[in-house]
Image (tube, rainbow, N blue to C red):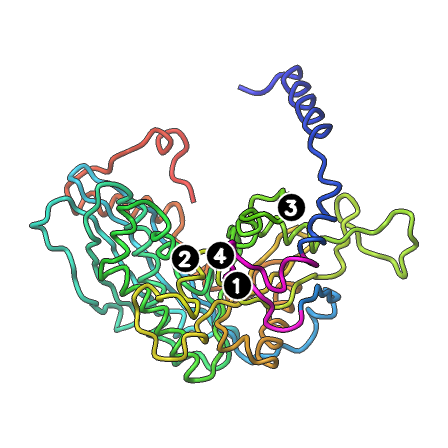
Amino acid sequence: MTLDPVHVDSIADLAAYLARHVDDADHVDVAARIWEGFLDPLYGPDGRVVAEPVDEKRLRAVDAEDVALASAPFETVHGLDSGTINPTTFKNGLVVDLAQAAMASVPSDLELHRHRSMVAATHVTDDTVPLDEPWRKVDEGYCRWRVMQVPKVNRYAEGIVHALALYLAESSHALEHAETVSDLLILDGPLYPVELLNWRERDAELRALSEELKPRSVVENYVRLVESFVERDVPICGFVKNPASKRIVGTLREGDREIDVPWTDDAAFFTKLLERRDDDTAAPERERTRGPEGRRTDELTFTNWFVSRGGVDATVATDGDAYGVERKLDPQLYETCFFVVYEPQTDVLYRVETPYAFARDEDTREAITRQILGDVAARRGPPEAVAKADELARISAREKSSLRRKFSETLDSDEVKRYDEVRWGDLE
């Protein structure tokens, strides 16, 4: 059933009403005020530094075409990603998610692309059923798989098996092939497993779970991964395609700062700060490429690098406990540093993270910056290494359905179906 014209007109009236009452014309000024007055450094309500510039605080711009055509700082770039079939509950009480991780290389390395690490994370309510299995190799050693039984919980079983399968597959595969990377590794996603780190900020059951050995062992993989790359002096970074953190805007709302923060997350704030529009009354120095609503699309805009110690980043800060994992290097070297880049043609903001061990060096952080800018400008999206890793690790909707049926047949138990799956089918 479609909308009638009267319904469309009503929706237009609703939009007009909202437009009259919600005006973001002054948000640019608010963003500029925050940038100028609160981020060098940004203090929490307890006086702790939540974020501060690694170097000079500044907003930067680069011609998109020029940076796309410039020579890349790194000869080879590797990307890493993992994909899952999504959590599946069966009528026998088993909850399972299957993840596979893959590493891609630019230029291509087909032998490397063939390697896979697969993890089935399982949850059962019966304590007498042991399901843990060590790594097993198949496909002439190119593929390995294991089963991991997650700690028993009353709630969140689906979210827990998903997070542990995803992060164990990704971190294990990265450690297994770390020596293959000689110039730069880009993780598809954040530098550390933020979903696991977030458990400490959730309710009592998830906080208790964060003390268990298995989630801590997964976090340890990421700590050891950072150490491996620091010790070999090979940069590693995370490319966050959908940044949703609230570390800055959340801190700004705390305490008495006499400023109204209108954005729900940091990405909205930085987008407002970095988006550029030509003044219709001004004569531009040269012909500009314009996007919707007069948005300039000829340049990428981006920030300097910041050290982040707010939210989950506090866990790996110098004064954090690193989830109880022993750190072998100076704790400061693990701190999360980031910059954000705004791609105007698609109107999308990305966040790039690297440990302070690499961000502290001007040449290294500039090389990472130029590499990311060149890739984003050339592709109008994520770097090629990340896109290739995503393609290798992704499990399609058809494959997900097939794998769930395989599990169901082998377990001799039907999947617990939900109405949305019947109505819409399997979704990516």
Mark 1 in CB contact with mark 4 (< 8 angstroms): no
Q: Distance between the residues labelled 1 and 3?
A: 19 Å
Specify the segment rendered in magenta.
35-56
Towards the viewer: 136 or 279: 279
Mark 2 element type:
helix
Give residue 125's position: percent from left, percent from top.
15, 44
In this view, the mark in front (2 or 4): 4
- Disc 3 marks a residue whose amino acid type is Glu
Q: How far apart are marks 4 and 3 (CA)?
A: 17 Å
Q: Mark 3 points at which residue?
A: 258
How packed mark 4 is, by other alpha carbons closer than 10 Å (few <14, some 14-19, many 20 or more), is few
Towards the viewer: 328 or 93: 328
Mark 3 element type:
loop
- Disc 1 marks a residue whose amino acid type is Val
- Residue 53 is covered by the magenta coloring: yes
Towards the viewer: 343 or 282: 282
Q: Name the residue under label 2.
A: 194
- Disc 2 marks a residue whose amino acid type is Val
Give residue 407's position: percent from left, percent from top.
22, 47
Mark 1 element type:
strand
In the figure, is residue 124 to the left or right of 396? left
Mark 2 in CB contact with mark 1 (< 8 angstroms): no
Q: Name the residue under label 1.
A: 49
